[in-house]
Amino acid sequence: MLQYQALNEYKAINYARKLRNMFKTNAELVCEEIGDGNLNLVFRITDKSSEKSIIIKQALPYARVVGEAWPLTLERARIESQALNVQQSICPGFVPIVYLYDSTMALTVMEDLSSHLIMRKGLVTRECYPHFACHIGTFLARTLYLTSDLALPSQMKKEKVVQFSNPEMCNISENLIFTDPYFASETNPFNPLIADKVVELRENNQLKLEVAKLKEGYLTHAQALIHGDLHTGSIMVTKESTKVIDPEFAFYGPMGFDIGAVIGNLLISFASHEGHTIDLQERMDYQAYLLTMIEQIWTYFEKEFRDLWEKESKERMAVIPGFVDHYLLQILVDAAGYAGCKMIRRIIGLVHVWDMESIDDPSLRAKAEKLALSIGKELVLERQQVQRINDITSLVRQLTG
Amino acid sequence: MLQYQALNEYKAINYARKLRNMFKTNAELVCEEIGDGNLNLVFRITDKSSEKSIIIKQALPYARVVGEAWPLTLERARIESQALNVQQSICPGFVPIVYLYDSTMALTVMEDLSSHLIMRKGLVTRECYPHFACHIGTFLARTLYLTSDLALPSQMKKEKVVQFSNPEMCNISENLIFTDPYFASETNPFNPLIADKVVELRENNQLKLEVAKLKEGYLTHAQALIHGDLHTGSIMVTKESTKVIDPEFAFYGPMGFDIGAVIGNLLISFASHEGHTIDLQERMDYQAYLLTMIEQIWTYFEKEFRDLWEKESKERMAVIPGFVDHYLLQILVDAAGYAGCKMIRRIIGLVHVWDMESIDDPSLRAKAEKLALSIGKELVLERQQVQRINDITSLVRQLTG
């Protein structure tokens, strides 16, 4: 195909048939469009006889969540496939394998992960993932450290900054995470039962000042190739395995943004369980489990990061005593702030999350949402006081009280 | 000419003759190579009958200061001409006019500023420049503010980050300013009479840690299109006029780096007068004059920056109370730190400066160099305590004592 066209299930099968070394001639292919995201088409193509399957993910020239009125670059398909390749090379087995990237069609053919579940859904049903903290901590440390100035020759890093320049997708995050939630707008729906809290938050100048500072960091701090959208909907899990998907927001940004995305979304799950009607003890146990998971993620991250610093540093100044400690503390402080921003935007911004939306009763949902807002707000405001990961989890415990 | 070749005076005249609308046919052209820089050829071509003149600045494929063993990208000629155009459009009259950029020849034909003097030389002979503080303060505010995320639409700024990606030139600064001076090396000559201070400084882990943080900012903080080498050798002056030249190190970096370059180099001049044999009162008067100039530069900068913030902000978060104050304070703190780094590298790094080199007596020069080192060190170490520009000048007064 010489020109871009959006696939449908029929065309996706035809496309898949033409792929080399993928399916046998005359394989009985079936196709299902499974995209529940906001921006793309996602087709799963399965050979019914062999059960072999692939994913074809195609970018649409507009944001699916809003429609054709919001045009959006197809470049994000390139960014995504290239980011997946970088991540695969740095941290093999933690992202889907890319079989093919087709720039004309703005699509990527990749490994099917249908044995895995979107983590956000598993968190709603209080699943446990015993290896997740180790997996994601390691993934974060390796992908962030090894794409930064610490590990790459100065000129190579700058080439990658150019390669992963991602203006349109960054602009979405700038608006949806750091700006829109703080101004009254029809594009920011929220539960009417939390209206007082929303007003209060939008009048909190200290909070908005801190969000402005965090936005400045997102706009300017080209520290590492970050995933850029690492919420629990971009993570697929089994008990044994963790796969990070959808890096179409990838660009050179602050390391703390990715770590904050993971922490913030686990804390959204934490808060959501205040609103799910379950046994009190069961809730408290699962909430405690999530906080322990957050502590473990940071612990694994820090250990791997320090190992890499010790063994893989190209930066000559890395040998200076105290630099790694300072660097890690800045990441942690940033992560706390970005976690807070991510929590707030999911409650009062354009795109809400299943953790909360799965609570039918609006007043129960309001209870959970208020807790998420208050945790988010305090993380943003108090992040400079954070010295270790337990300062974050302690703050959450206090606010849950 | 279809292929790059380095010009000589004869070839430069031939090149100039072929330029459209520049000189009359059969004009009597004379040429002088006036490059006293470290990286380029600079030819002045004058029509003897009309006195009309131009500059042809050509990049060499190696660093002139070291020789052909240090190859260097010709891309810097593009960066320089494009940066001059941006600066001219934002702050007309403060940079030489670009008549032509020739990518094949890696050269820029530009306005001759022979009526102006390199400022560094004027400072050695204790000249006064009554408009300089206003000029450079305004230039800094306009070029930095108007190329930042504050003033540019988010996507346009990111396009400019790519356009001005400048890996090779940045790498020079990373090494010469932020790394090499802190490690013993033959490429770091210094006056043997200050050897004890150099050893002391290289063993100061607290200082090196702060330099490492400042280097991280230089590597990652893509805040504005900075000049990147704004020392007093990149500024040409008359009593009435100020021209900023040579932006071949331009890239998206921290605003404080440019301001720090100006302040740091004025403070090198300040310190150098400790070593020049002149009347005590005269020295003290001129040193006081330089400190007042630094205070005025910041005052003009801040005033213009606040004006622009008020009138030209595209960033929606700019309206948040306190954001401009926070932003300016961060710039000032950065400027103090970068000023310190710039002072240190000129005393114990690869490229020294005329302020000091013009002091013949090594022991007098050592006195001046020690003062420069001690001011530089304290600026780096104490920058987080700086709240206003007078905190910087007070610190200098104390150390001079």
Image (cartoon, coloured by chain):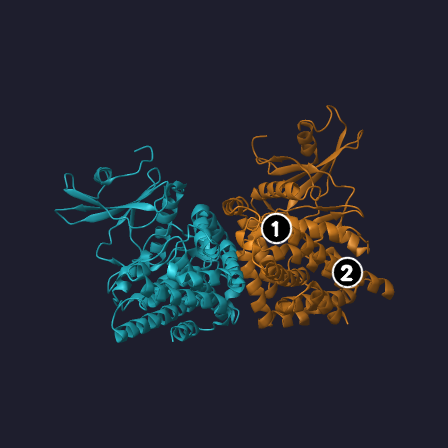
Chain colours: A orange, B cyan
| Residue A213 in view of the camera | yes
Residue A272, numbered label: none
| Res. B283 image quadrant | bottom left
Q: Chain of mark 2?
A: A
Mark 2 lies on residue: A292
**Does B243 sit above or below residue A11?**
below
| Circle 2: element type | helix
Query: Which residue type carries mark 1?
Result: Tyr
Looking at the picture, how far across and down is residue B323, in whole percent? 51, 68
Quick check: B225 left or right of A101?
left
Looking at the picture, how far across and down is residue A147, in whole percent? 59, 47
Looking at the picture, how far across and down is residue B27, in whole percent? 15, 41
- In the foreground, A313 or A285: A313
- In the foreground, B120 or A179: B120
- In the foreground, A33 or B39: B39
Looking at the picture, how far across and down is residue B224, in whole percent? 45, 57
| Circle 1: element type | helix
Residue at screen point 45% across, 67% down: B379
- Residues marked 1 and 2, same chain: yes
Numbered marks: total: 2
Q: Are marks 1 and 2 in contact (CB under 8 Å)?
A: no
Query: Which residue type carries mark 2?
Result: Thr
Within-10-Å neighbours for mark 1: few <14, some 14–19, many 20+? many
Q: Nearer the viewer, mark 1 or mark 2?
A: 1
| Real-space Cα separation, disc 1 to disc 2, in angstroms | 24 Å
Pointer 1 or 2: first along the chain: 1
Quick check: B287 left or right of A378?
left
Quarter of the image with the N terminus of chain B is top left
**Does B279 sit above or below residue A6?**
below
Mark 1 lies on residue: A145
Q: Chain of mark 1?
A: A
